[in-house]
Image (cartoon, rainbow, N blue to C red):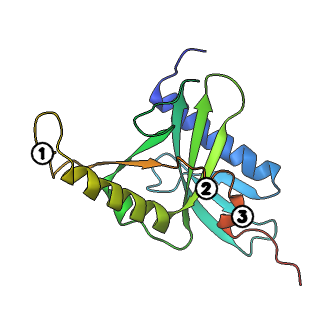
């Protein structure tokens, strides 16, 4: 399978997330393209709990990118401050073959992770000397799979009484 454009892979990721949520019994709706920060709105079946989801998609080859220990997703510096209790990221991996995989992460965890990793990057000299402190890009990784298929973190499951 050849790589598709980042725009198409992003759209595919959003549809895959909405489909996976629907498959799990939740209500999922894609937002309009100009909805800032939220790609999918999801709720439980009776609409008593809802969350906003930002979807980020990475196309990966079968051979992992060793620099980041596997799939990685690029984010803007704004990710350091997005910490809403009802805001989540779903990081999608589109492999060359097979089904996509999902990493469901609370926004506060993403914010802390990208903040910490960027500060470490700033202190690590590059080939041409110190890194630029004004670089607005951030990288999120989940090398140990801590968030893989953690749909429960969305808090949409019905509680048994």
Mark-to-mark CA distance, 3 and 2? 10 Å
Looking at the rendered image, the quarter that the C terminus falls into is bottom right
Q: Are marks 2 and 1 in contact (CB under 8 Å)?
A: no
Does residue 152 appear to the left or right of 2 in the view shown?
Answer: right
For disc 3, the marked residue is 152
Mark-to-mark CA distance, 2 and 1? 32 Å
Residue count near mark 3 (Cα–Cα under 10 Å), binned few <14, some 14–19, many ≥20: few
Q: Earlier in the sequence, mark 3 or mark 1?
A: 1
For disc 2, the marked residue is 147
Could you tell me residue 103's position as x and y percent?
Answer: 60, 50
Q: Are marks 3 and 1 in contact (CB under 8 Å)?
A: no
Could you tell me residue 88's position as x and y percent?
Answer: 55, 61
Residue count near mark 2 (Cα–Cα under 10 Å), binned few <14, some 14–19, many ≥20: some
> Observer-nearest residue: 88 or 27?
88
Dot 3 lies on which element?
A: helix
Q: Residue at x 73, y 68 (%)?
A: 156
For this orientation, the residue located farthest to the bottom is 161
Q: Earlier in the sequence, mark 2 or mark 1?
A: 1
Could you tell me residue 139's position as x and y percent?
Answer: 38, 47
Q: How many marks?
A: 3
Q: Residue at x 77, y 59 (%)?
A: 26
Dot 1 lies on which element?
A: loop
For disc 1, the marked residue is 130
Q: Residue at x 11, y 34 (%)?
A: 128
Q: Nearer the viewer, mark 2 or mark 1?
A: 1
Could you tell me residue 10's position as x and y percent?
Answer: 52, 37
Q: Earlier in the sequence, mark 3 or mark 2?
A: 2
Q: Nearer the viewer, mark 3 or mark 1?
A: 1
Q: Relative to 12, does residue 153 appear above or below in the rendering? A: below
Q: Relative to 113, does residue 136 appear above or below in the rendering? A: above
């Amino acid at each position: 399978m050849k790589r598709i454009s980042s725009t198409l892979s992003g759209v595919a990721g959003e549809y895959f997330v909405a489909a996976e949520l629907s498959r799990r019994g939740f209500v999922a709706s894609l937002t309009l393209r100009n909805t800032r920060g939220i790609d999918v709105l999801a709720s439980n079946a009776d609409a008593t709990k809802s969350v906003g989801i930002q979807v980020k998609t990475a196309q990966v080859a079968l051979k992992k990118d060793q620099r980041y220990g596997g799939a990685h997703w690029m984010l803007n510096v704004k990710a350091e401050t997005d910490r809403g209790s009802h805001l989540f990221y779903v990081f999608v991996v589109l492999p060359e073959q097979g089904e996509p995989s999902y990493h469901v992460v609370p926004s506060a965890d993403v914010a802390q992770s990208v903040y910490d990793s960027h500060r470490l990057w700033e202190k690590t000299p590059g080939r041409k000397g110190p890194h630029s402190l004004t670089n607005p890009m951030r990288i999120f990784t989940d090398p140990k799979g801590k968030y893989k298929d953690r749909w429960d973190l969305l808090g949409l499951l019905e509680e048994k009484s």
